């Protein structure tokens, strides 16, 4: 009936506005979080696959919410991207990561994720240069991880931008490889140093021969293009052994360490503090 229909709409409206309200609250909270330094950068090691030696850490953001506890990035990165807050958030993470890494032993790199939204910022290149200069971190110790969506949009502008980063000496990694609209032509067209195979291919690796075939093909391709390969999400020794046999260059995952606050990372050499 008509009235039931109207009720339906009322309920729908209420549900909508509750959702909108929750979103607005979260957006306001995230804005405060950036201003009030509630964001933390945690670090997960990656290792040389053959020797097992630590080669660096990936910087992963977390939000220490005053009432909700530690919030993982999957719960706020999308909102940050939709609201533009990813720009100040991303700058915070990059500056923090460069400052932290500048105090590590000099053979360790730091990898930082850049959002496609950040690529639209005119000042991104200058911001990265300033983060390096202010921290004193040599550019060759910074790796920037981007996903292929960056390559789909504004392809030629982003290509030129990536060339400038490479020219500075920064390493470029293609993140989550195999999950998106991967076209192999991207690999040849863009100046990547490293391909990170998405963890969905690593899971069940030992039970799924097809995944081995895919990884083996990626390794062969990368070698031909003079790029290295990282396997992420390595959780078991069996997976690690298999990946070594398949020829991946680097490995990252819970087997080698979970993301941790900087205070919990142990270094062989003394660490300079730059806070
Ligand atoms: P990602 O860049 O692919 O990062 C790897 C994710 O896999 C991290 O999740 C990490 O904790 C998780 N991981 C690592 N090893 C294992 C493993 O052995 N098993 C499993 N199951 N997972 C593992 P996290 O920290 O929750 O980050 C999720 C995503 O959020 C990241 O995926 C990245 O896309 C995004 N993100 C994190 N920090 C930043 C940031 O500072 N800026 C931007 N733009 N995005 C970020
Ligand atoms: Ca990443
Ligand atoms: Ca990834
Ligand atoms: Ca990801």
Image: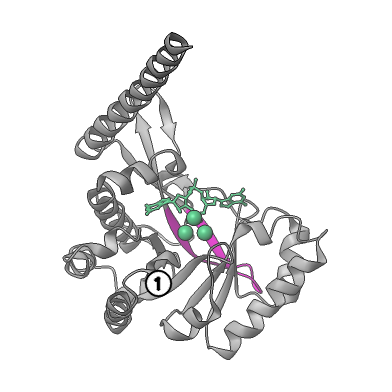
- Residue 61 at x, y = what percent? 39, 47
Judge from the rendering whether residue 216 lies leftward or rightward of residue 112; answer left or right.
right
Q: Is residue 40 above or below residue 236?
A: above
Name the residue located 26 percent from the left edge and 44 percent from the top edge.
83
Q: Is residue 40 above or below residue 47?
A: above
Occupied quadrant, residue 137: bottom left
Name the residue located 28 percent from the left edge and 65 percent from the top edge.
119
- Residue 229 at x, y = what percent? 58, 74
Residue, far bottom: 224
Occupied quadrant, residue 108: bottom left
232 part of magenta stretch: no
- Residue 91 at x, y = what percent? 25, 55
- The residue range painted magenta reads 44-59
Q: Which residue is mark 1?
A: 151
The answer to whether residue 106 is seen in the rendering is no
The kind of secondary structure the magenta stretch mainly shows is: strand
* Neighbourhood count class around disc 1 (C-alpha, 10 Å): few under 14, some 14–19, many 20 upward: many
Name the residue located 49 percent from the left edge and 60 percent from the top edge.
268
Which of 14 and 113 lies nearest the eye of the viewer? Answer: 14
Give the tally of numbered discs. 1
- Residue 87 at x, y = what percent? 24, 53
Judge from the rendering whether residue 144 lies leftward or rightward of residue 247; answer left or right.
left
The answer to whether residue 137 is seen in the rendering is yes
Q: Is residue 54 above or below residue 92?
A: below
């Amino acid at each position: 009936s008509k009235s039931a229909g109207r009720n339906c709409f009322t309920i729908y409206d209420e549900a909508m506005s509750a959702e909108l309200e929750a979103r607005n609250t979260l957006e306001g909270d995230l804005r405060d979080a950036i201003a009030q330094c509630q964001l933390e950068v945690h670090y997960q090691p990656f290792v040389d696959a053959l020797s097992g030696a630590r080669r660096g850490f990936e910087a992963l953001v977390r939000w220490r919410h005053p009432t909700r506890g530690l919030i993982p990035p999957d719960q706020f990165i999308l909102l940050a991207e939709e609201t533009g807050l990813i720009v100040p958030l991303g700058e915070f993470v990059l500056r923090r990561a460069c400052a932290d890494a500048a105090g590590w032993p000099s053979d360790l790199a730091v990898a930082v994720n850049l959002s496609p939204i950040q690529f639209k910022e005119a000042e991104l290149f200058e911001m990265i240069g300033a983060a390096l200069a202010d921290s004193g971190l040599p550019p060759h110790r910074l790796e920037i991880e981007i996903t292929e969506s960056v390559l789909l949009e504004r392809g030629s502008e982003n290509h030129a931008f990536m060339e400038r980063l490479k020219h500075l000496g920064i390493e470029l990694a293609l993140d989550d490889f195999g999950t998106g609209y991967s076209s192999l032509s991207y690999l040849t067209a863009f100046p990547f140093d490293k391909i990170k195979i998405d963890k969905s291919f690593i899971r069940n690796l030992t039970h799924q021969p097809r995944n081995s075939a895919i990884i083996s093909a990626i390794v062969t391709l990368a070698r031909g293009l003079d790029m290295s390969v990282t396997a992420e999400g390595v959780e078991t020794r069996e997976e690690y052994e298999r990946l070594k046999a398949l020829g991946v260059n680097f490995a990252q995952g819970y087997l080698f360490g979970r993301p941790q606050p900087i205070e919990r990372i142990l270094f062989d050499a003394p660490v300079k503090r730059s806070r």
